[in-house]
Image: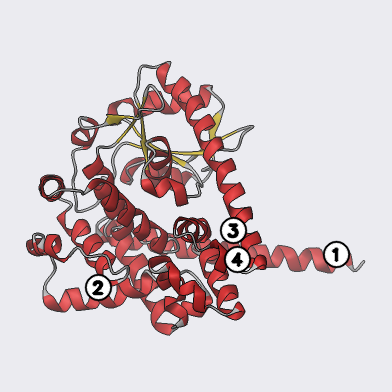
């Protein structure tokens, strides 16, 4: 088994663990942990009733990650209750996105997910009210750079992240799922008009099933950060398995993608779920053929995405992976803003990174020098 396919093939076909050696297991665990897929690996093996083929030392990793995930799932539900209280006080519905939405809607990805923050979608004309209410209820901005604050509020589809002062939970408050300055212009009120309630938690809402898939697709394939891309691709696969159960469901998803202008991200999602995860989506991919790029561009994107979707681990990296992830990073920014804004922004980011690295190193050398006397 190839090292860069070890984790993926194990998650797709868990019965292959019968042939894994101890070095294979060690590598698989490292790949899974760095890709935020360790919980998914444990769940997949448990669901396949293959736990007896897991070495004792590996089983300890699974026990630990499942305990950690159980804690996070409980914590996220508690935190959502606090956020709901803050939004209820100003009569704004709490609409969750991504990981928190999976958990509160009891979607398939939730059983394998860990959580870093909580994402909300609110009407743009109420976002200032929402921010003020969250500040009153104990959250504070963690963005102290004036330029970055301007970047979020002027060009992005969200305000700077907020962190609670005592519980340290982080919230990303969105008014759309795509940036205002990007080439795709999406009417967020169409998303909010189709939200559905979470049956287990009164007063909490998530996107409709098709919109949830489309948001996951646009978040993965229009973004430039690919460190957890494989995890997100498995999430989309789970959402499709759970909700696309009839031809009518597929027709609704594809029609919705065309309506919202998200046919290209959905095309990529189905294409790489098929090629990377071996999920049979070809008939529906054909229905999105008009959203595919031309043959030359598609060949180039295949080379970039198949490398970007590898597990985030040194055993899967080569020069091509490094170049692919850099180009995907630049592409992600190009999809956020036009060139006239992008070039000064990237130049400033590069300058700030070099400055911080230089001054941090200089400060460290100064401290070391002073400590000798």
Question: Hey, which quadrant is residue 295 in on the image?
Answer: bottom left
Q: Quadrant of residue 192?
A: top left
Residue 122 in sight: yes
The CA span between labels 3 and 4 is 37 Å
* Disc on res. 62: 3
Q: CA distance from mark 3 to mark 2?
A: 35 Å
Looking at the image, tell me whether mark 4 or mark 2 is earlier in sequence order.
2
Q: Relative to 19, does residue 312 appear above or below in the rendering?
A: above
Task: Answer whether labels 4 and 1 touch (C-beta < 8 Å).
Answer: no
Please tell me which residue is depicted at 15% across the width and 79% down the height of the picture.
Answer: 296
Q: Residues within 10 Å of mark 1 (few under 14, many from 20)?
A: few
How dense is the environment of label 3, judged by Cα within 10 Å: few (below 14), some, or many (20 and up)? many
Q: Is residue 188 above or below residue 14?
A: above
Residue 370, numbered circle = 1
Q: Quadrant of the C terminus?
A: bottom right
The residue sitting at 39% across, 17% down in the picture is: 90
Residue 162 at x, y percent in the picture: 50, 37
What is the C-alpha distance between the residues marked 3 and 1? 46 Å
Image coords of residue 156 (percent x, y) = 33, 45
Callout 3: SS: helix
Label 3 vs label 1, nearer the camera: 3
* Cα–Cα gap, marks 4 and 2: 33 Å
Q: Tell me, what colour scheme is on the image?
A: secondary structure
Q: Is residue 300 above or below residue 131?
A: below
Q: Position of residue 4 (x, y in %)?
A: 44, 78
């Amino acid at each position: 088994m190839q090292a860069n396919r070890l984790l993926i093939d194990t998650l797709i076909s868990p019965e292959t663990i019968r042939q894994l050696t101890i070095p294979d297991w060690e590598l698989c665990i490292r790949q899974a942990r760095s890709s935020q897929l360790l919980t998914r690996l444990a769940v997949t093996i448990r669901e396949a009733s293959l736990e007896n083929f897991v070495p004792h030392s590996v089983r300890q990793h699974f026990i630990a990650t499942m305990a950690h995930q159980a804690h996070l799932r409980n914590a996220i539900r508690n935190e959502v209750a606090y956020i709901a209280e803050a939004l209820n006080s100003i009569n704004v519905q709490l609409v969750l996105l991504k990981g928190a939405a999976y958990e509160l809607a009891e979607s398939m990805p939730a059983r394998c997910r860990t959580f870093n923050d909580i994402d909300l979608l609110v009407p743009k004309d109420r976002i200032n009210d929402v921010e003020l209410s969250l500040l009153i209820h104990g959250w504070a901005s963690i963005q102290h750079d004036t330029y970055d604050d301007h970047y979020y509020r002027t060009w992005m589809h969200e305000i700077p992240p907020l962190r609670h002062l005592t519980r340290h939970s982080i919230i990303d408050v969105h008014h759309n799922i795509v940036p205002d300055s990007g080439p795709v212009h999406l009417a967020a009120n169409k998303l909010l008009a189709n939200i559905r309630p979470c049956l287990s938690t009164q007063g909490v809402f998530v996107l409709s099933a098709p919109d949830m898939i489309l948001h996951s697709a646009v978040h993965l394939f229009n973004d430039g950060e690919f460190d957890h891309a494989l995890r997100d691709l498995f999430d989309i696969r789970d959402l499709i398995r759970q909700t696309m159960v009839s031809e009518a469901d597929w027709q609704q998803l594809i029609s919705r993608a065309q309506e919202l202008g998200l046919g290209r991200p959905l095309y990529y999602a189905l294409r790489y779920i098929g090629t990377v995860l071996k999920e049979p989506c070809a008939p529906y991919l054909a229905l999105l053929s008009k959203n595919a790029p031309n043959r030359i561009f598609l060949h180039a994107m295949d080379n970039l995405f198949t490398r970007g979707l590898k597990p985030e681990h040194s055993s899967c990296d080569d020069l091509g992976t490094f170049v692919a992830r850099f180009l995907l990073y630049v592409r992600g920014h190009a999809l956020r803003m036009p060139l006239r804004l992008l070039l000064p922004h990237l130049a400033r980011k590069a300058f700030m990174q070099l400055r911080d690295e230089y001054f941090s190193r200089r400060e460290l050398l100064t401290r070391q020098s002073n400590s000798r006397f």
